[in-house]
Amino acid sequence: IMMITEQMYFLSFLIAALGLLAPSVYALQTEPPSSSRRDFFNKATFSIVASSAGPLWLPSAAANAQESAASPLKLPPIGLGCWAWGDSLFWGYNPKNDGDLKEVFNYAVSNSKQPVLFDTAEVYGAGRSETLLGDFAKSTNEGETVLATKFAPLPWRTTPESVVKACEASVKRLGGRPIDLFQIHWPNAYCNAQYWDGMAMAYEKGLIKAVGVSNYGVDATRASHAALAKRGIPLATNQIQHSLLYRYPQENGLLQACNDLGVKVLSYSPLALGLLTGKYDADTVNQIQGPRKSLFKKTVGKPEFKNLMASMKTVASEHGNANLAQVAINYCRSKNTIPIPGARNLRQVQSNYGSLDWSMSSEEMNFLDHASSKISYADPSINWFPRQDKDTGLKMFDS
C-alpha cells in the first residue's frame, strides 16, 4: 500500500507540475474554452494530490524548539489572498478580467495606512498570479506592499538548492525585488529538513526577507522553527486554513503553539471559499461553477449552518452596515490571526477592508464560538497533505 500510494503521490504531482514546466502556459490559458490543451493544463495545475504515510515513530527533539530572534517582518491586520488571480479551474480566472484585479490592487494600496500584504504562490495559475502581482507592483514603492509567495515541494525537489532555484524564479515573476515573505506551501512526505535549509540559503543570499511555512502542524512548526533558529533565522509565519467553519487549529493546539513560538498565523479561506459571505443557500448554491458546488451543497442545508448564519447576522447588526463577510474576517482577527481573504473585484476588496472599521468584542467572539462549534464544512482527516515525514517520522500535518 505504501508503495502504491507513493507512486500515486509522484504521478499526481508530475501531472500538476506540467503547468509549472510548460513555457506556454499563459498562451494556453488565452485559447478558446474548447481547447483540450487548455483544459488539461488548467486541471493539472489544480490536481495536486498526495498521500499520507502510516504511523511512524516521532523524534522527541522535534517538539523542543530553540529560541530565535523575533522576525522583523511587519504585517498588517489583514491581507489579500491571490489564489484566484490566475486559477482557471477553481475560480474561473479569465485574462479579460485582469483590469478588475488591477483595480483591486490599486484600491488596497491607495486606501491602506499600512503596507498591504498580498499572498500568492508559484502554483497559482502556474505562475500567472505571481506575474500579475509583479506587474501591478511596478507602480508602487517597495514599502507600500508586503509580497508573500510560496514554494511548492514537488516530488523531484529534494535538495536545498531546489528551493533556491524556485525562489529565484518567483523573484523574477514578482518583479525582481527581494520577496518579503517566502513560505513552504505544504508539508512533504520527505525532504522537509532540506527545504528548511533551502529557505535559510535563500534568506542568506538576500533573495527573501522572511521565512514562513504553510499547512504545518504543531510538531512540524516547532521543528522548522528550531532548525531555522540554529542559523539565526526566525520563523515568521504559518499560513493555515482557519475560519468559523474550520476551527480545528483552535482545538488541537496549533494556534497556541504558534503564539508560544512567536510565529504569526495567516488564516487562509477565512470566508470558507465564500460560504460565509451569506450569498449561498440551498437555492443559490446551484449557481456555483466548479469544485465548490459539491462542497457547499453538503453544508448549506444543515440546521447548524443556518444557525451560524443567523448568529453572524446578529453580530453584524451591532456594527452599523457590517456584512457577514466582515464578521467572518473579524472573527479570525479576534483569534490573534491575520486573515487573508481573496478579492476579484472592487466590491469585494472594499468589503474586506471595511472590516477594519470595527473590532469584535470578546462576548461576540464567544457567541460565535458556540454557534460554530457543531458545524464544519471540511474534515481535516480527508486531505492530500502528508501527515508524516516518512524518513524521520516527524508529524507534519494536523489540520
Image: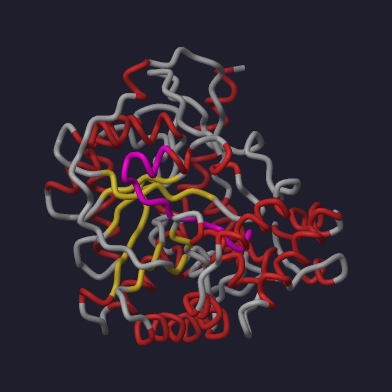
Reply yes or no: does residue 258 show up in magenta. Answer: yes
Give percent across and percent down for residue 40: 59, 56
Give percent across and percent down for residue 142: 21, 74
**Residue segment shown in magenta:** 257-272
Q: Quadrant of the C terminus?
A: top right
Q: Quadrant of the N terminus?
A: top right
Task: Determine which quarter of the picture holds residue 128.
Answer: bottom left
Give percent across and percent down for residue 196: 27, 36
Residue 105 falls left or right of residue 199:
right
**Against 376, is 197 above or below?**
above
Residue 324 falls left or right of residue 58:
right
Give percent across and percent down for residue 223: 33, 30
Residue 145 falls left or right of residue 89:
left
Task: Determine which quarter of the picture holds residue 58.
Answer: top left
Give the colour scheme of this rendering: secondary structure
Reply yes or no: does residue 136 show up in magenta. Answer: no
